[in-house]
Amino acid sequence: MAVLTQFDSQLWQWCDMSYAQNKALCLELQNSCQVNVNLLLLAQYLDITMDVSGPQQYSTDQWQALMNAVGEWDERFLTPYRKLRKLAKSSLNEQEYQQMLAVELMMERKAQRTILNKLNELSPNGQATNLVSYLSLFGLSDIDANEIGLIAP
């Protein structure tokens, strides 16, 4: 069973850095394939740190369980709020818009805690890389996953 709680801050800081380098790609996958960016970056992190911390390959079913764990939060709160923020952008001054972004980030952190809690219930049993296993849930092949080209921070 993975125990990443002590790495919570380090893990999500790394994901923040990766997001900054891959923002356009992450948003494209989020908007075109409904990929959860937190899970995408977690898959990348687990693949990159696998050599250091041992096997951490999760199966497609396990990635589905992670999606299910965070799905209700995303559907009920995060996604509607994100839509509201985008709709309101033209009616807000910069400070108000930044405040909305800060609230959205707080909601993302809640989603990340939910993901991490579920991840800690799972024991890695996958055969493919995490990125391949996760993206296969969206009909993307291993070739697609390998060609996505996420840049590591």
Image (spheres, grey):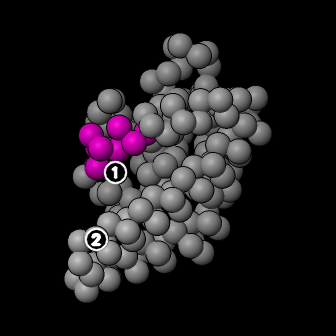
Location of residue 37 with respect to 132 vertically, above or below: below
Q: Position of residue 143 (x, y in %)?
A: 36, 37
> In terms of sequence position, does the residue under pointer 1 or pointer 2 come before the other?
1
* Amino acid type, residue under disc 1 in the picture: Cys
In depth, the one of 91 and 80 nearer the eye is 91
Residue positioned 23% across, 71% down in the render: 94
Counting other residues with Cα less than 10 Å from the Cα at mark 1, is it few (<14), some (14-19), or many (20 or more)? many
Residue positioned 46% across, 45% down in the render: 40
Locate residue 20: give its quadrant: top left
Q: Which residue, given by chain and number where applicable, does mark 2 sit on?
A: 95
* Amino acid type, residue under disc 2 in the picture: Gln
Q: Position of residue 108 (x, y in %)?
A: 51, 57
Residue positioned 32% across, 82% down in the render: 87
Residue 111 highlighted magenta (yes or no): no
Are circles 1 and 2 on residues that touch, CB within 8 Å?
A: no
Q: Position of residue 103 (x, y in %)?
A: 46, 66
Where residue 106 is drawn, which disc sits there? none
In depth, the one of 41 and 113 nearer the eye is 113
Q: Can residue 136 be seen here?
A: no
Q: Which residue, given by chain and number where applicable, does mark 1 sit on?
A: 26
Locate residue 141: give its quadrant: top left
SS of the residue at dot 2? Answer: helix
The dominant secondary structure in magenta is helix
Counting other residues with Cα less than 10 Å from the Cα at mark 2, is it few (<14), some (14-19), or many (20 or more)? few
Residue positioned 53% across, 13% down in the render: 52
In depth, the one of 101 and 129 nearer the eye is 101
How far, Cα to Cα, is label 1 from label 2?
A: 25 Å
Q: Is residue 120 left or right of residue 41?
A: right
Give the residues drawn in magenta, as a range. 15-23
